[in-house]
């Protein structure tokens, strides 16, 4: 009885208290919520202003970091004012882009005007940071494939010229299907696929390591849509149909989505092909072999056989085969040239030339500072072919016409002892039927079929 009385009294007192505080409950709750929100916001802004890892957010989050970067750019400018940087071409600059030859990249811009100094500082810093990222700043020695792509290749320039050649000599349609022979890391094929979702690419190379590197690095940086339109094959360009597919199995699925009215062979059968001969691929509009790769073929018989394979891969509606070639008096002597990039120096070393067999050995080295180097990162035993020899082989293989686009290179004797060998952008490729011998030159050779 006593317990029941206590309970009743408690309920009565609680009811009275509830009616007393009810008018103020919402106000107290609002004050508590506002206090919590203020503390949370304060901690966020405190981290944004004080932490070096502050995110670049809208508002004031990046103030300290922007100021620190501005100071860093100034220090970088003072300590690295001689650092060269790799030229990055914009999409609108295709008309003046240069091909992927050993020293055919345009030179770094010079600081001629004080008015442009601030802009130059920002560009140098951005290029430096990009190179550090591309080379893998966390590793002691960058990948030789990364170094090669940065210093030797210029895929946008090559693609620009290939499109120009196709529209000039074939025309009537846009080229969509590319085959890159001697593709290495397939950087050109990857770039080809970026700009048009209808494009496809086939890469063929004898070096399995470079193909695997492409899958793990170049393709990992693009979307699944791009990677699904690229097929990589491991094999010899002289036996392309025996080459084996190295792409992950889903990569071949793009074939099922294509219109194969212009394809080679029958419709795609169920299952995943393991060789190029088993796969039904769209006929290529363009086949290319860059970075002087055709010099790896030493006999006329092999060269003609390769050109016939390239011809057979091209569309019956018309297509082109494009390769590059170098020459000049300097190509037939011992030579060493170098070009500086952010974080490393690229060195081209050419051994003595065998005039009877027209063969030489080329080695590519990469120097990091004064004490560290990656020597013989790439070595090639090349036969130096002449332009008339290449033309004869192409015509015998069955190409309808052959065109030569020539470009004179700077005199190597004037740069052999210099800190850097560069090629200016003012000299462009021209289609010529005659060309006087020079110290050094580069050429695009364009073979056309079935027009």
Image: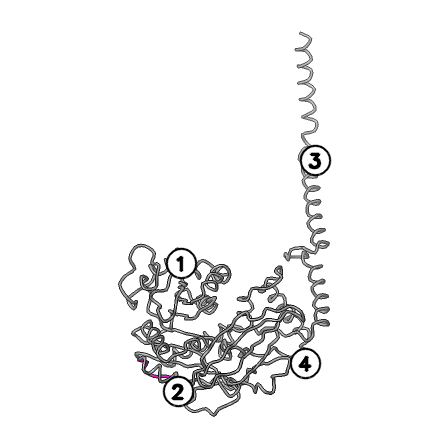
Asked if the residue under mark 4 is in contact with the one under mark 1, i.e. CB atoms within 8 Å, the reply is no
Callout 2: SS: helix
Q: Tell me what residue is drawn at x 60 percent, y 67 percent.
A: 131
How far apart marks 4 and 2 lie (CA) works out to 46 Å
Residue 17 in which image quadrant: top right
Residue 37 in picture, x, y percent from top left: 68, 44
Asked if the residue under mark 3 is in contact with the one under mark 4, i.e. CB atoms within 8 Å, the reply is no
The residue pinned by badge 1 equals 251
The residue pinned by badge 3 equals 28
N-terminal of the two: label 3 or label 2?
A: 3
Residue 412 in picture, x, y percent from top left: 57, 85
Residue 269 in picture, x, y percent from top left: 28, 57
The residue pinned by badge 4 equals 113
Whether 399 is among the magenta residues is yes
Q: Tell me what residue is drawn at x 42 percent, y 56 percent.
A: 248
Observer-nearest of 20 and 11: 11
Nearer to us: label 1 or label 4: 1
- Classify 10 Å Cα crowding around label 4: few (below 14), some (14-19), many (20 and above): few
Residue 22 in which image quadrant: top right
Residue 225 in which image quadrant: bottom left
- Classify 10 Å Cα crowding around label 1: few (below 14), some (14-19), many (20 and above): many
Residue 85 in picture, x, y percent from top left: 61, 73
N-terminal of the two: label 4 or label 2?
A: 4
The residue pinned by badge 2 equals 388
The relative height of residue 235 versus residue 82 in the rendered view (above or below) is above
Quarter of the picture containing the C terminus is: bottom left
Observer-nearest of 138 and 171: 138
Q: Tell me what residue is drawn at x 70 percent, y 56 percent.
A: 52
């Amino acid at each position: 009885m006593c317990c029941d009385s206590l309970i009743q009294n408690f309920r009565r007192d609680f009811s009275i208290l509830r009616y007393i505080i009810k008018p103020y409950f919402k106000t107290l709750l609002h004050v508590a919520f506002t206090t919590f929100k203020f503390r949370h916001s304060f901690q966020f802004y405190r981290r944004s202003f004080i932490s070096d890892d502050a995110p670049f957010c809208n508002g004031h989050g990046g103030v300290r970091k922007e100021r620190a970067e501005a100071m860093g750019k100034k220090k970088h400018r003072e300590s690295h004012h001689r650092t060269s940087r790799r030229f990055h071409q914009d999409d609108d600059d295709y008309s003046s882009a240069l091909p992927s030859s050993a020293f055919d990249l345009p030179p770094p811009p010079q600081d001629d005007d004080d008015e442009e100094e601030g802009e130059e500082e920002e560009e140098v810093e951005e290029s430096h940071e990009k190179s550090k990222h591309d080379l893998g700043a966390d590793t002691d020695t960058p990948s030789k494939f990364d170094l090669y792509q940065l210093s030797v290749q210029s895929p946008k320039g090559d693609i620009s010229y290939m499109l120009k050649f196709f529209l000039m000599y074939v025309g009537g349609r846009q080229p969509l299907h590319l085959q890159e022979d001697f593709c290495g890391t397939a950087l050109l094929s990857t770039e080809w696929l970026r700009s048009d979702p209808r494009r496809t690419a086939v890469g063929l190379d004898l070096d399995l390591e470079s193909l695997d590197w492409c899958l793990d690095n170049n393709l990992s940086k693009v979307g699944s849509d791009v990677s699904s339109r690229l097929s990589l094959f491991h094999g010899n360009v002289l036996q392309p149909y025996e080459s084996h597919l190295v792409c992950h199995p889903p990569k071949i699925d793009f074939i099922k989505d294509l219109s194969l009215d212009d394809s080679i062979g029958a419709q795609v059968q169920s299952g995943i092909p393991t060789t190029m001969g088993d796969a039904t691929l769209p006929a290529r509009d363009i086949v290319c072999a860059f970075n002087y790769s055709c010099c790896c073929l030493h006999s006329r018989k092999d060269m003609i056989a390769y050109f016939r394979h390239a011809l057979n891969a091209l569309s019956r509606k018309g297509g082109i085969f494009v390769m590059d070639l170098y020459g000049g008096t300097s190509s037939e002597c011992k030579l060493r040239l170098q070009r500086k990039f952010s974080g490393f120096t690229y060195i081209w070393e050419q051994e003595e030339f065998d005039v009877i067999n027209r063969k030489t050995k080329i080695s590519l080295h990469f120097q990091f500072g004064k004490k560290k180097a990656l020597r013989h990162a790439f070595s090639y035993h090349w036969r130096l072919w002449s332009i008339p020899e290449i033309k004869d082989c192409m015509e015998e293989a069955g190409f309808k016409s052959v065109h030569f686009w020539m470009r004179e290179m700077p005199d190597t004797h004037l740069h052999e002892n210099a800190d850097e060998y560069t090629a200016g952008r003012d000299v462009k490729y021209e289609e010529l039927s005659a060309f006087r011998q020079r110290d050094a030159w580069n050429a695009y050779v364009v073979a056309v079929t079935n027009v």
